[in-house]
Structures are given as structure tokens and as C-alpha cells.
Amino acid sequence: MTGIGGQGIQLAAAVVARAAVDEGREAQVFGSYGGMMRGGSTESTIVIADGAIVAPPTVGETWSAILMHHEHARHALACLRPGSLVFVNSTVVADHGSLAERLTGEGCTVFEVPASDMGAEVGHVMTGSMVMVGAYAAATGLVQLPSLVTASSASLPSYRAQHVELNERALRVGFDSVPQGTVPAWPASVEAAR
């Protein structure tokens, strides 16, 4: 997941990882962000597995990416392999149509989700990352919506408890925005190796 500070990238990544753990899998999250709270680069890599994860894995390639902002997406785009899934925040990502066309031409499946707009409709633009996580879960089936809802509540610090309901609404709106099970959660090459 990549974006700019203030979009909730680190929280969204923690929610996905916690939901996976709650469903009985292993997960590791690696967050990277600048010193600014708002506007700086922020990226989070999530590794989910059915068995033990050797710590820390080096992730040179990925089968999926969530791009919440174009400004710092270069690294995530460089890690995509053919056949990857890419979720693009079409509200914010500049020239998202051209990006989607290019990625589709490279064999990727692209989901253009107006996550920031949908978050604003739910109650706050900053819930856009939760909208996107809901869409990601619906399309991939990697984690289930009830697990995301529980993980979202558990991941918020106590001084942010007033946002539990808002995040749940954002997750549900995102989940409902794409067809469920559009793509398999695990790429075929991973399935074959399991």
C-alpha cells in the first residue's frame, strides 16, 4: 500500500494484517513513512502466509498493490509482476485512466475505486484507505469483511475510538463497491507452490 501521510496507509495495513491473523494465518507488516504526519511519503508492505514467515522477508515482487496517491507510487509499481492486481484511488491518482490502461497492457487487473470520494460520502475523506481495503477484500477474498471490521476496531488507539463506526461504514462501502471474488486471493504461482 502506498500513498501520502494522512491517508491512513499504516492503519489500513495493520487492519488487513490483524484480520488475516484473526483468520488463522501469519502476517507481517513493514511500514515506511517520512517524518511528516501529513503529505510525506508512506508505504506499507504486508506479507500474509498460511505458515510461518521467515522474518523479515525481502519483498522484491508483489502480486497486488493499493495506490492511494500517485506521488509516491513508483516503488510499488516497480514491484508489480505480470498478472498483478492493482487498486487505484481514482479520486486522487493523477491520470489514473492512462495508468490503468498501461497496467492492463502489462497483464495487470486494475480496479479504479474513487476511495477518497467514497470516504467523504461516508463521513470523512480520511477513511478512503478503509474504503480501499474493503474493496480489496471483496475482490480478492484474502480476508473477510467481519474480520476487517473487528480488526479495524482493535487497531484504533483508545483516543480514536470515536472513529470505529465511521471506519466500519467505510469498509462496508468499499466492500460493496466491487464484485465479490472477482479474482483469487492467491496468484496461481503461489497456489502451485503450496
Image: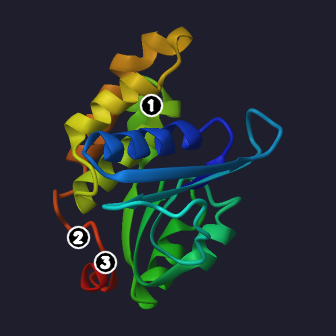
Q: Residue pushed farthest left?
A: 180
Mark 2 near mark 1, Cβ–Cβ under 8 Å? Answer: no
Give the alpha-carbon distance from disc 3 to disc 1, as whole Å: 33 Å
Say if 54 sits above or below 159 in the image: below
Q: Is residue 20 left or right of residue 45?
A: left
On-image quarter of the N terminus: bottom right
Q: Residue at x 58, y 71 (%)?
A: 59
Q: Circle 2 is placed at which residue position? A: 183
Provide the secondary structure element on which disc 3 rests.
loop
Per the rendering, the mark at residue 120 is 1
Q: Position of residue 185 (x, y in %)?
A: 27, 66
Query: Taking the image as drawn, is residue 122 in sight?
Result: no
Q: Which residue is drawn at 39% across and 39% down?
A: 18
Say if 125 sits above or below 164 in the image: below
Say if 157 sits above or below 150 in the image: above
Q: Circle 3 is placed at which residue position? A: 187
Front label number (3 vs 1): 3
Q: Which of marks 3 and 1 is nearer the N terminus?
A: 1
Depth order, front residue of 116/145: 145
Per the rendering, the mark at residue 88 is none
Q: Is residue 105 left or right of residue 4?
A: left
Q: Where is residue 56 in the image (x, y as percent from the top left)?
A: 61, 61
Give the alpha-carbon distance from disc 2 to disc 1, as whole Å: 27 Å
